Image (spheres, helix red, strand yellow):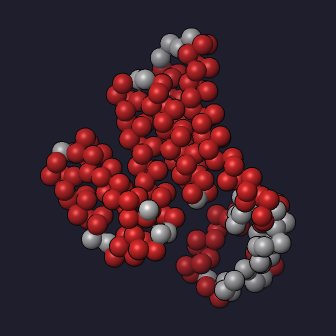
Amino acid sequence: MHYWIGSAALAYIFVLTSKLGGRAAAVIAVSAYSTSSLIWFQLGAAYTDLGLVFFGLSATWSLLQWLQHRNVIYLALLSVFSGAATSVKLTGAAIFVSAMPVILALLISQKQTLRQLRLVFFALFVPAVLIALPFTIRIWLHTGNPLFPLGGNLFKSPLMPNIFKGARFSPVDRIVDYIQIPWISDFEQGILVEA
């Protein structure tokens, strides 16, 4: 299955880059993507990031199709692929969130009837929620936290060990602490311990 998803991601990269920059750019993009040793490792290890790449590229394709054709079916596809990406990995929700400003800006700039806006709302949110919700519920039932491994202080999951030493990160309970984690992990490694 992971080989299929990796191959499909390569095909999406080729199609999207061809559409945006031509065939020569598509060949370069596919070559650059496929020469990464990390990609070949993930193909053999069935890692979730390839699924996230596949569904993210599918959502991007759907958004580009909607921008070109303005057919609500492409928004529904964007929602389906975003929901699938979120069910693979929580960071997949960023795909949906980042598409929202583009969609909202275009809808506001056009004169839309209330019926059209309801249809767009339905197409955008219902499929994503219906696809991502079962996985979120399953995670919640197994861990006590629907955002596992994030939000451990909000939901008090017994399966999330405290991975930080020091009062500032024990437990992480402020948004500022989450924002500082990349900085801390790069420049203050002593504060981190292995889980």
Residue at image coords 49%, 69%: 47
Q: In the image, is 44 to the left or to the right of 122?
A: left
Quadrant of the snapshot with the C terminus: bottom right
View extreme (front): residue? 1
Location of residue 182 with respect to 100 vertically, above or below = below
Residue 127 at x, y percent in the picture: 60, 36
Residue at image coords 62%, 20%: 118
Relative to the observer, which residue lies in front, 123 or 166?
Answer: 123
Q: In the image, is 158 to the left or to the right of 56?
A: right
Give the mark count: 0
Q: Quadrant of residue 182?
A: bottom right
Q: In the image, is 45 to the left or to the right of 131?
A: left
Residue 126 at x, y percent in the picture: 63, 33
Relative to the observer, which residue lies in front, 72 or 190?
Answer: 72
Residue at image coords 28%, 66%: 34
Residue 192 at x, y percent in the picture: 67, 83
Residue at image coords 30%, 45%: 16
Quadrant of the snapshot with the N terminus: bottom left
Residue 81 at x, y percent in the picture: 50, 44
State whether residue 144 appears in this view.
yes
Q: In the image, is 83 to the left or to the right of 57?
A: right
